[in-house]
Amino acid sequence: MTPPSGPRRPSPPSARPAPNPASVTRPRALAARKLRFVLRDGATVEGTVKAGRDQSLVAFLNTRSGWMNVTDAARVGAGEPPGHLILQTDHVVIAISRDGGVGVSTSASGAGERMVELVLIGGRIVRGYVPAADGQRLSDLVARSGRFIGVSLARLFPEGADVGDIAVQTAALTVVRDLSGRPQEAEE
């Protein structure tokens, strides 16, 4: 085989295949999100993460593989200046949007909400609403959620503190109880 003589001539533009619009991905526009993380040992970290503008808190956490960068971060009550920390996502039990600027989850169209009680390792209780279809089993709901499940209008017990919309790590759950149709239990 003889090498080509001279430089290779470029193909005319019309001969190149057009890019497939379905395969072209745009980089996700990132936004700073102020979050509070409650860790397995009870410590709390507050700081800022970069997440997609339209990305839910649950989707963000479910895509973190092991470690997560948190800037302007400090452990609450530790008396340390804010700085750059990395958190092991396996140790995050609850994530809370401090400024309410990030939605907790995206529910499928047609999905309703179900009031539940989540009992965490160590006995802490979270009551709130999870997106669920009519008749959907709680076991399927938790399994479908991935590593984190979104809870709207959450209240922590025993302190009775309203914390808004949060993400809870499914590995930290010991019991999930359906409270639908039991409004008196939600108020306790």
Image: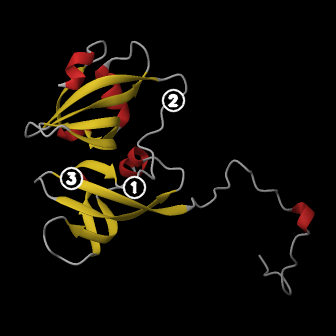
Q: Is residue 172 left or right of residue 154?
A: left
Task: Give the foreground label among 1 and 2.
Answer: 1
Q: Amino acid at mark 3?
A: Val
Label 3 residue SS: strand
- Residue 159: give x, y in percent of width and height: 13, 40
Q: Amino acid at mark 1?
A: Asp
Instruction: Look at 12% across and 38% down and name the residue there.
Output: 124
Q: Does residue 147 appear in this view?
A: no
Q: Does residue 112 appear in this view?
A: yes
Q: Give the residue at mark 2.
A: 108
What is the C-alpha distance between the residues marked 2 and 3?
27 Å
- Residue 80: give x, y in percent of width and height: 17, 76
Instruction: Look at 25% across and 36% down and name the residue there.
Output: 155
- Residue 19: give x, y in percent of width and height: 76, 56
Q: Give the residue at mark 3.
A: 38
Crowd class of label 2 (few under 14; some 14 to 19; many from 20; radius 10 Å): few
Which corner quadrant holds the C terminus? top left
Q: Based on the displayed image, in which of its 4 quarters is residue 79 positioned?
A: bottom left
Front residue of 25 and 49: 49
- From this view, report whether residue 176 is shown above or below residue 169: above
